[in-house]
Every structure is written in structure tokens, then in C-alpha cells.
Image (cartoon, coloured by chain):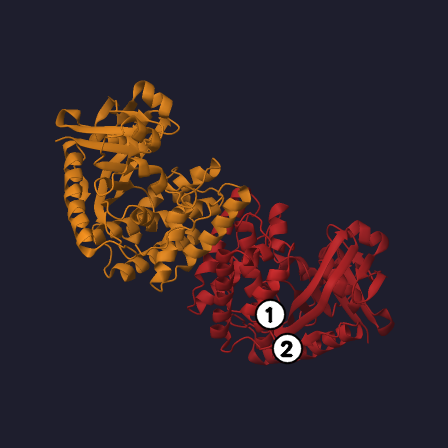
Chain colours: A orange, B red
Amino acid sequence: MGVNILLVGAGAVGAFYASRLHQPEKGVHVSVVCRSNYKAVLASGFQLKTRAFGEYTFKPQAVFPSCKAAAEANPSIVYDYVVIATKALPDIDDEPQEVAPVVTPGRSSIVLIQNGVGIEAPHRARFPANPILSAVTVISAAQTEPGVVVQHRWTRISIGPFSGDEDSSLAQSTINQRDQYAQSSLERLVAIFHDGGISDAEGWDTIQIQLVRWHKIAINAAFNPSSVLSGGWGNADMVNDSELRQHTRGCMQEVFDAARKIFGRPFPSDLATIDAIIRSTERNKGSKPSMLLDWEAGRPMELEVILGNPIRIAQRYGIQMPRLQTMYGLLRMAAQKRGIQRPREATPSTAKL
Amino acid sequence: MGVNILLVGAGAVGAFYASRLHQPEKGVHVSVVCRSNYKAVLASGFQLKTRAFGEYTFKPQAVFPSCKAAAEANPSIVYDYVVIATKALPDIDDEPQEVAPVVTPGRSSIVLIQNGVGIEAPHRARFPANPILSAVTVISAAQTEPGVVVQHRWTRISIGPFSGDEDSSLAQSTINQRDQYAQSSLERLVAIFHDGGISDAEGWDTIQIQLVRWHKIAINAAFNPSSVLSGGWGNADMVNDSELRQHTRGCMQEVFDAARKIFGRPFPSDLATIDAIIRSTERNKGSKPSMLLDWEAGRPMELEVILGNPIRIAQRYGIQMPRLQTMYGLLRMAAQKRGIQRPREATPSTAKL
């Protein structure tokens, strides 16, 4: 029995993982939804230049310009996995609405390869009966021109199921059934990754994957907005300045403390300590965080999922994160001033996790 | 017996108070040191357009381009008061060094009409035997062209003595003598202000004047840097945004809490509460904080006295101010990125108060 995967948002990270998941000889078929690189990928697929697997071409099963187009092209297809690897902009995009045409209720597993926290809630609200798999990556990759993807370092992807049924109208038996299905869906996906050579694809439980996600947000929330607000310094510049070192450390501490309270346990010991993050950042000269690149290009930033959501989730647990809230307030208004970010009317999700 | 006053930094605020202190008929003579407006003031004095006292011309006793020039012009004069009304930039200017030529040791009272906290320490270190009077103003005034000063609202000036002898090598008896002299000097200065029509000139004790100063810093530290970091919003815009309202409130709370711990008592009840400040700021539409005007003009900002000094003073009492420290780190590096602020080698004062 074959496996159909639709990858939505085939930028550098999405295209890299899509190319490893695509195993037609084993019946695993990956199609992609492309935006800016649609024409190039339709014409000649992806050219991959990877450190992990050398150079190769990846021709997806099919290439679509939108989820709607994908649904119309294959009305009868059931996608086992709808993998979303877009930038997470819940204040601007209604992503569940966009992917709805390709999500078969109760069947398609929705896989979120995205930054930030609280990203699952809008999908849970829209697709109460579908498995949601939350994925956190550690990878350095870039699309150097449309369809050309360079993977510099790392391949790790951590995946775990998301439940989040605070507001659900589903019967508990339906939820239990869905979550059992999510578990087998997770195991199958991790196995496909392993078959594709991603040996550090890891499956986790619902709490552990959130801890991994919050650990990554600690780093992103400390460095991304600071880079923009300080006028464009890179991560290494910041930790090598005594005041910004204290600031970034303080930001990470706020997230570490909040996560411990929210989940009732500290970060797993295999995740880097704040000291270790600071030390490795000292040496990472020349790299600019994604939010700075977005800001410099006049593109919307992942403000809500990197700052807004963690602040709101923490507040619901009675936890304040003053440094993060300060940066959130400042950067949100700075983006408005520049006309970069025009939030849609709907407020970002306020579901718990 | 006459009183000689030298006012250093005759911008809008300095010129307004100088014009009220100057009472030649009573033997009170005010000379001024001007920078950018030197030529205009030398030629025709100051034109004042005041709400409190109508329109009038103020011709100072003498006009100098620098303290050194003042000292050379009148080598034998003793200034009873050297009133400093410049912008406080301890990271850039060595102000005690600049005023030293006009300060008679043990005789001249140094009056600091400046924003920020910790501004007295460099003067105390340089002039251990001179009275220092610390002054906090509530006034709205602007220099619309060189030598033309408009006073819009308010006249209040609160003044109190500063001791600060943690690192002093003076004998205790000398300190006592100096502080007694400071007290009589303060009383005389307040009386001259009253004679000049500033009926809300108020004399306070050493603790109370610091509480007034820290109360003002609560407002300045909350709104000034936020205005720059948020991309140029005014104070009213900020409190009318829910996130920046929470942020500015949090900043003020940090200073209120710190001041209570440092001084062992809350702010006097006649000073505005945080709620009252927020409410009055809501209505103050269109006004831009001074730090934003400086930033927009590419001038150095009063970062050290508004953020750096309060943070360092609080830290010596074991108190953290995370929101302020975050803004300090960010804005300091943003100013460096723009090439606005090139700190001199000497670190800002670290004396206690």
C-alpha cells in the first residue's frame, strides 16, 4: 500500500526533507506545493547540493501552485501526510483554510515543520479529527535560486503528536481513536525518514516534543527580535557585547523557567544549557537570524509564533516573561510603522498548547 | 552682597530659568555659557515667549562660548552657583572637566538641572568639597530658533542637596561643613527662584530629591527608549497599543519597585501613580519624547543617565530591572550601529547614588 505525501511550502527546509521522503521505489510519493519557485520546480524539479547526501535532482510526483490546485488536479487522492513547511504567520495567513482542500477529514495527518510555539492550535481547531504531528528541525539550508537548495549542516528532525483538545466537541472515544492513529502515523513517518537516510529523525511523545519546541523558541526568541531591534547585529556580535549578552541570557532564562512550570519538568538533559548556547553562539560569526533577513527584505516576521504565542501561553499559566513582552510590544509596533505587518482581523490562537 | 551665577548650557530650559534668576536690581547676576546659540545670544540676548510671564528679552550679565572662556574673561570672579543645564551624556562628555575652570573649590555650588539618575556622582568625584544641588524640572519649553525660547507649560523645579561620599577622602568634619553650606546655598537659591516668580521652586532633603528624580526617570525610561525602538511612535500612540501599554507600565513598575527598595520608602503621594501617568499620557497626542528627536536628528541620546545608571545602581542593591536592561542593551547597540554614540573610554560612574 502506497503512501501519498503533499509538502506545502517547498522552500529550502521543505524541499530538503521532501527529497528524502520521496521513495517511489517503495511506494512513497511526494508532491509539492510551491509558491515563488513554482515555475522553476515545475520545469526541472529541485537541484540539491547537500553535505549529507551529495548532489542530486529531486523530481516530485507532482508540482502545484496551491493546495486548491492540488485538490482540483486529483479530486480522489487521499494524502496520508500534509506536511506544512511554510513560514508561520498566523497573524497574516489563514493556513488551515489554505490547506483544507487537501486534508481528508479523519485520514490525513497534518505535519507542521515550523518555528515557534502554539502553531498547532489553529489546525486542531479546524481539523479536530485529524492527527497533528509537530516537528522541530535542526538544519542549516538555503535556497540559493529558485529550485536550487543547499544543505550546509545538520539533518535532525524531532516529531511528536499534538492533542490539544481543550475546546473540542469530539467524544473522548473519537479523540482516543485519533490519537492512536496519530501514534502509528508518527511511527510510519519516522520510518520513512530513516529509509530516506535521515537517521536522526526522532519520534517523541506529546510533552517531549513540546519541550523540544520550547527549547528552540528560547534561542529564537532571544536572538531573532534582538537582532532587528538592535539595528541589525548578528548573533555572535550580540553575545560578545556585555549588555546584550545579559539580555539574551535573560530572555532564554524566561523561556526555560516558563517551560519548566508549564510542563512540570526541566528540558531534557541532551538539549543545550543556556551557557552552552551562549558559548556556541560566540563562535557563530557572520550568521544573521531569519527575522533580521525578513526585516531587511521588508517581509513579515514570525513575531506571533516566536514571541506572541509563548507570551500568551505563559500568561495563561500565570507566568510573566517581561523581556520577551517588551520586545514583542516594540517590534510589533516597529513592523506596523514600516508597513511590513498588517495583521488580519482574527486574533492569533489562544488555545492552551 | 551680590550673587554670581553661571548657567552652562543655555538651551530652552536653561535659558528660561536663567531669565528668572537674573535679578540685577537685587544683585543677582546671571551669565551664560552657550554653544550652538552663542552668536545669536551674544548679539541680542534671549527672546522669551512665556505662558507664565509673557514676552520679554533677557540680556545675561555676560555670554561665553565655553567655561574656559568664562574663566579667562574673569579670572577673579567667584561663581556662587554653576548651574549645568546641558544634556547629560557622561559616556561622551567629561562635564566635570569642562566646568572645572569656573568652579571655585569649596565655594561654588554646582546645580545640576538634568535628566536621569546618577548624574551627580562624576561631579562629586571631581569636586569633593563643593555643594552639589540636584534639580528636577517639570517644564515644557523649546528653542524655536537660536536665542528664541518658548515656554509652553509648567515651571516647577525641585531642588535638593546631594552628598554621596562613599569614596570620599574628606574628613567627616569637612563633609559636615560642606553639607551645612549646601543647605544654606539651597535655601538661598530657592528664595531667588521665588523672587523671580517661580513660586513652585521647591527645596527638598537628600532622599526626597532623589525620589523625585527616580520618579521622573520612571517616566523617561519607560517612554523615551521605547519610542526609538518601536520605530518612532509618540507616547500617546504607545499607551494606546495594548502590548506597549503593558510594556511601559511594566517599565515604570520596575523603577517604582527599585526606588522603594533603594530608598526604603515609596514615592511621595503627591507624585503621580502609574495609572495616573498612563491616563495623562493617553491624552498627550502628538508629542515626541526627546530621545526620539535626538535619534531622528542623529544626535547622541541620554541613554546612560536614563537607562544605564538606574540599572547599575539597582544592581548594586541586588535589584534587577529586566525590561530596562533589555532596552538598554538593544538601544546601545542600535546607536553604535548608526554611528551616533561613540562612548569615551572612561566607564560611566558607578558610585552608589
How many residues crowd mark 2 within 10 Å: few (<14), some (14–19), many (20+)?
some
Q: Which percent across, then down, holds residue B117?
A: 56, 65
Please tell me whether mark 2 sits on a helix, a strand or a loop: loop
Depth order, front residue of B293/B133: B293
A244 lies above or below B200: above
Q: Chain of mark 1?
A: B
For residue B316, the mark is none
Residue B53 visible: yes
User: Is A270 on the left or on the right of B51, as rendered?
Assistant: left
How many residues crowd mark 1 within 10 Å: few (<14), some (14–19), many (20+)?
many
Residue A300 found in image quarter: top left
Depth order, front residue of B41/B284: B284
Q: Nearer the viewer, mark 2 or mark 1?
A: 2
Residue B131 visible: no
Q: Which percent across, then down, holds residue A145?
A: 37, 25
Indicate the amino acid at tag 1. Answer: Pro
Depth order, front residue of B298/B24: B298
Mark 2–mark 1 distance (CA, rounded to whole Å): 21 Å
User: Is B24 on the left or on the right of A55, as rendered?
Assistant: right
Looking at this view, name the residue that lies furthest to the top: A43
B291 lies above or below A64: below
Please tell me whether mark 1 sits on a helix, a strand or a loop: loop
For residue B204, the mark is 2
Depth order, front residue of A227/A313: A313
Q: How many marks?
A: 2
- The residue at the point 26 percent across, 32 percent down is A6
Indicate the amino acid at tag 2. Answer: Trp
- The residue at the point 34 percent across, 42 percent down is A96
Q: Which percent across, then down, holds residue B296?
A: 62, 46
User: Is A1 on the left or on the right of A227, as rendered?
Assistant: left
Q: Chain of mark 2?
A: B
For residue B128, the mark is 1
